[in-house]
Image (cartoon, grey):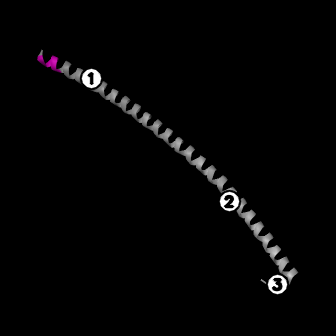
């Protein structure tokens, strides 16, 4: 009788252990999914910030190129004016 009681107890322990392992597997999978979701959200938030920064820098670069073109044009115009005045007044610079 004692042997069958031990066998039954051992079978119940194995069932309980399998149940606990199953619960642990499920819990681990849930935690992994939660972490994966959090990481994806964090990545997407950072990606959005980087894209906005890239856009701002591209706009800034465009403005600076326009300013450089304008300055070059003003410089060329000023040089032409100086050259014209030097010819008009017979001076050499």
- Left or right, 42 with respect to 23, comes to right
For marks 2 and 1, give the one nearer the viewer.
2
Picture residue at 13% right of the left edge, 19% below the top: 3
Q: Mark 3: few, some, or many residues within 10 Å (few <14, many ≥20)? A: few
For marks 2 and 3, give the one nearer the viewer.
3
Determine whether the residue tagged by mark 1 lies in a helix, strand or loop.
Answer: helix
The Cα–Cα distance between marks 1 and 3, rounded to whole angstroms, is 106 Å
Label located before the other in sequence (1 or 3): 1
Q: In which quarter of the image is residue 74?
A: bottom right
Residue under label 3? 91
Residue under label 2? 64
Determine whether the residue tagged by mark 3 lies in a helix, strand or loop.
Answer: loop
- The residue closer to the viewer here, 67 or 19, is 67
Number of marks in the rendered image: 3
- The residue lying furthest to the top in this view is 1
Picture residue at 83% right of the left edge, 80% below the top: 86
Picture residue at 49% right of the left edge, 41% below the top: 42
The Cα–Cα distance between marks 2 and 1, rounded to whole angstroms, is 71 Å
Compared with residue 71, is residue 53 higher up or lower down, i.e. above or below? above
Label located before the other in sequence (2 or 3): 2
- Which residues make up the magenta segment? 2-6
- Residue 4 on the magenta segment: yes
Q: Where is residue 31 in the image (x, y as percent from the top left)?
A: 39, 33
């Amino acid at each position: 009788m004692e042997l069958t009681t031990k066998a039954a107890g051992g079978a119940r322990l194995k069932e309980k252990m399998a149940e606990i392992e199953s619960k642990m597997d499920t819990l681990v999978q849930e935690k992994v999914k939660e972490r994966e979701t959090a990481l994806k959200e964090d990545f997407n938030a950072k990606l959005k910030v980087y894209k906005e920064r890239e856009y701002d820098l591209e706009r800034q670069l465009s403005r600076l190129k326009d300013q450089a073109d304008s300055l070059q044009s003003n410089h060329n115009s000023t040089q032409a004016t100086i050259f014209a005045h030097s010819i008009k007044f017979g001076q050499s610079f």
